[in-house]
Image: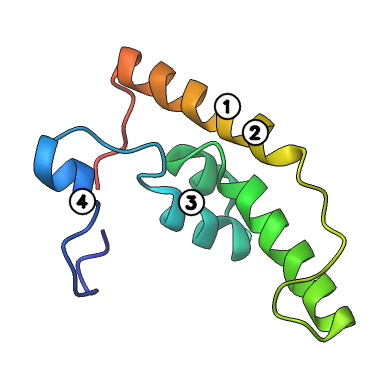
Amino acid sequence: MHPGLPGLGCPLRTLTGVPCPTCFLTRATGAALTGDLSGSLQWHLFGPITALGLVLWSGLALYQRRLIPTGLPLWPIPIVGGALISYWLLRLGTNSWPSG
């Protein structure tokens, strides 16, 4: 959690001390959106992927003039979810979390 922002941070990490699968993903996405790909990857592998998804989603939403664009495929959801959980388990096993 950013020290200048209010809130408790990750509820799972606050309650158990174990980072959740998306811990540091907000920072990684923000870094990717500002062009800091190296920093983004240090925070979370999915940062650049999430940033790209947000840019594509925003472009499609603006094009369709809808907050939730229509015609999006659902098949990537379980694939990305599985990859996110796999990455999380790998990080838990190697204890490779950034200090933040």
At 27% from the left and 64% from the top, the residue drawn is 2
Label 3–label 2 contact, CB within 8 A: no
**Residue 5 appears left or right of 27:** left
Query: In terms of sequence position, does the residue under pointer 1 or pointer 4 come before the other?
Result: 4
Q: How far apart are marks 4 and 3 (CA)?
A: 19 Å
Callout count: 4
Reading the image, the residue beneath label 4 is: 11
Mark 2 is on which residue type? Pro
Q: In this view, does 16 lie above or below 14?
A: above
Q: How far apart are marks 4 and 2 (CA)?
A: 23 Å
Cβ atoms at labels 4 and 2 below 8 Å apart: no
| Label 2 crowd bin: few (<14), some (14–19), many (20+), radius 10 Å | few
Give the structural element (helix, strand or loop) at label 4: helix
Give SS at disc 3: helix
Residue nearest the observer in this picture, 67 or 91: 67
Whether the residues at callouts 4 and 3 have beta carbons within 8 Å, the answer is: no
Name the kind of residue labelled 1 in the image: Gly
SS type, badge 1: helix
Instruction: Report the side of 36 relative to 24 (left or right).
Output: right
Crowding at mark 1 (Cα within 10 Å: few <14, some 14-19, many 20+):
few
Front-lying residue, 72 or 23: 72
Label 3 environment density (alpha carbons within 10 Å; few <14, some 14–19, many ≥20): many
Which label belongs to residue 28? 3
| Mark 2 in CB contact with mark 1 (< 8 angstroms) | yes
Q: Name the residue under label 1.
A: 82
User: Marks 2/1: CA distance?
Assistant: 6 Å
If you read the primary sequence from the N terminus, does the residue marked by circle 4 or circle 3 appear first? 4
How many residues crowd mark 4 within 10 Å: few (<14), some (14–19), many (20+)? few
Q: Quadrant of the N terminus?
A: bottom left
For residue 32, what is the image quadrant? Answer: bottom right
